[in-house]
Image (cartoon, helix red, strand yellow):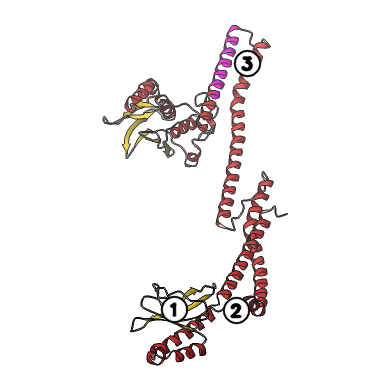
């Protein structure tokens, strides 16, 4: 019992309501005990007697009998103290004496004094013209509070409390449902996952519950996307491995069946088997490298890197290939370029991949330019070509694994398995940088990389 969130919320609200009603009853009881109404009436009576005496000091102060009569008629106690606060006269000499009046520092309407019997007296005091102190006092009223409470307040308090408690319980039930129902929807959706027809939950309820619902929807979307990516990855790997495995199996079978019965035929079969197995080996290494980069476990060897020297080395490396293809290879680097802290081998891998792609898709008489410059606090590097470009609908997926903008080239020996750009992006992001691409079919492609001088 009371194990669900809804029941616990309802019980909590009910407990708080009961405590609130108990506090109200207690405050009312204290109010009745203090009885401020009767106290104010008594204070007013004391002030009247004081004003009568102060207005006619000759009549009362010089005639104790008149002062005694005034005190008895008004049921008060009148005392006179000397300037040294010594009791000179008391209308109730038989009662326990009262202490000399305290100085009224806070300017209260009345003050309290306790006599020798422990009774509490309310009194007001004033100083006369001759220096004496006039005190008018009366016992603080005591009323049978329990009788007043039971006779006049008990029934209304019980009726009002019962009505308030019932209404509060209804409100508490509605509030508990307002909080718990959206959470229950999240629980039901989590139990149904992964259902094909699972729809996002509409956020409602308290702000925090809405945030939780949005986070749950986002999590489900990410999990679904990840599962789809895994399915696509398995399908792509299977597709990429199918062609070389088929070639290896076919030529191996030819050797076993002695279909390749000449030395030249056997050599050709062995060469194809070797080339296809080397291709599979490269793809396995690329996949392993990409997995490490995505997981953040790749070991980057950070050190000062001269970007100018690195890009010139890339240009020198691809110069023979560029000459063979009839493409002009340029480098545009300012002299005052600062030193970059990075993994030089990884950056060389990035620009080797980008330069190789640019040369492959740039026709003769075209140009490929590697450049670097400062852009604020970051270094901006680019590889631009005047090649065939990329269609606009292919740009968003250009960095996806196994994706190739020209499907007719997929699986080809020259263009690889479509992992190069995915590895490039992961290396750049591992350095705390960003990579972007701009391209237009028939007008070339530009890859732009922004790297911080010091990795974060």
Given residues 391 and 90, the one toward you in this image is 90
Q: Is residue 12 left or right of residue 298?
A: right
Camera-nearest residue between 192 and 95: 95
Q: CA distance from mark 2 to mark 3?
A: 115 Å
Query: In the picture shown, does residue 113 fall above or below 434?
Result: below
Q: Nearer the viewer, mark 2 or mark 3?
A: 2
Magenta region, main secondary structure:
helix
Q: Which residue is mark 1?
A: 109
In this orientation, which residue lies closer to the viewer: 106 or 52?
A: 52
Q: How many marks?
A: 3
Query: Residue 432, position in %: x, y?
Result: 42, 35
Q: Residue at x 59, y 29 (%)?
A: 237
Q: Say which mark, if any, is on residue 251.
A: 3
Q: Which mark is residue 303?
A: none
Question: Is 261 situated above or below 334?
Answer: above
- Which badge, 2 or 1, is on the more N-terminal residue? 1
Residue 143 marker: 2
Q: Position of residue 18 (x, y in %)?
A: 64, 65
Residue 341 position in % (x across, y down):
36, 29
The boundaries of the magenta stretch are 259-284
Magenta-drawn stretch contains 227: no
Name the one closer to the observer, 20 or 430.
20
Label 2 Cα crowd, 10 Å radius (few <14 / some 14-19 / many 20+): few
Mark pair 3, 1: CA separation: 116 Å
Q: Quadrant of residue 151?
A: bottom right
In primary-sequence order, the first of circles 3 and 1 is: 1
Q: Earlier in the sequence, mark 2 or mark 3?
A: 2
């Amino acid at each position: 019992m009371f194990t669900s969130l809804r029941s616990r919320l309802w019980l909590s609200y009910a407990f708080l309501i009961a405590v609130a009603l108990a506090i109200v009853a207690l405050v009312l009881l204290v109010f009745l005990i203090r009885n401020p109404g009767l106290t104010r009436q008594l204070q007013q009576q004391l002030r009247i007697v004081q004003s009568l005496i102060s207005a006619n000091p000759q009549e009362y102060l010089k005639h104790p009998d008149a002062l005694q009569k005034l005190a008895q008629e008004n049921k008060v106690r009148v005392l006179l103290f000397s300037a040294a606060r010594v009791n000179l006269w008391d209308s109730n000499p038989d009662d326990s004496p009262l202490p000399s009046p305290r100085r009224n520092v806070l300017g209260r309407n009345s003050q309290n004094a306790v006599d020798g019997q422990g009774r509490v007296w309310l009194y007001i005091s004033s100083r006369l013209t001759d220096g004496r102190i006039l005190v008018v006092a009366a016992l603080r009223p005591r009323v049978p509070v329990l009788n007043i409470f039971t006779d006049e307040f008990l029934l209304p308090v019980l009726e009002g409390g019962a009505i308030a408690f019932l209404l509060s319980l209804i409100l508490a039930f509605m509030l508990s449902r307002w909080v718990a129902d959206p959470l229950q929807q999240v629980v039901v959706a989590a139990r149904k996952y992964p259902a094909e027809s699972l729809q996002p939950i509409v956020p409602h309820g308290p702000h925090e519950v809405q945030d939780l619902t949005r986070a749950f929807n986002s999590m489900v979307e990410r999990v679904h996307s990840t599962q789809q990516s895994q399915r696509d990855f398995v399908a792509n790997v299977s597709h990429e491995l199918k062609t070389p495995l088929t070639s290896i199996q076919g030529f191996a079978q030819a050797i076993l069946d002695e279909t390749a019965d000449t030395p030249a035929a056997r050599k050709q079969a062995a060469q194809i088997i070797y080339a296809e197995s080397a291709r599979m080996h490269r793809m396995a290494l690329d996949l392993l490298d990409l997995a490490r980069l995505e997981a953040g476990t790749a070991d980057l060897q950070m050190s000062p890197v001269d970007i100018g020297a690195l890009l010139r080395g890339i240009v020198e490396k691809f110069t023979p290939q560029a000459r063979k293809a009839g493409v002009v290879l340029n480098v545009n680097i300012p002299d005052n370029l600062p030193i970059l802290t990075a993994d030089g081998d990884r950056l060389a891998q990035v620009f080797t991949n980008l330069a190789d792609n640019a040369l492959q898709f740039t026709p003769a008489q075209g140009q490929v330019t590697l450049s670097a410059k400062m852009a604020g606090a970051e270094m901006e590097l680019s590889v631009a070509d005047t090649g065939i470009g990329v269609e606009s609908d292919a740009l968003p997926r250009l960095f996806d694994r196994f994706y190739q903008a020209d499907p007719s080239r997929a699986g080809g020996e020259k263009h690889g398995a479509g992992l190069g750009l995915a590895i490039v992006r992961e290396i750049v992001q591992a350095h705390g940088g960003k990579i972007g691409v701009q391209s237009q079919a028939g007008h070339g492609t530009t890859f732009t990389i922004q790297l911080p001088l010091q990795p974060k």
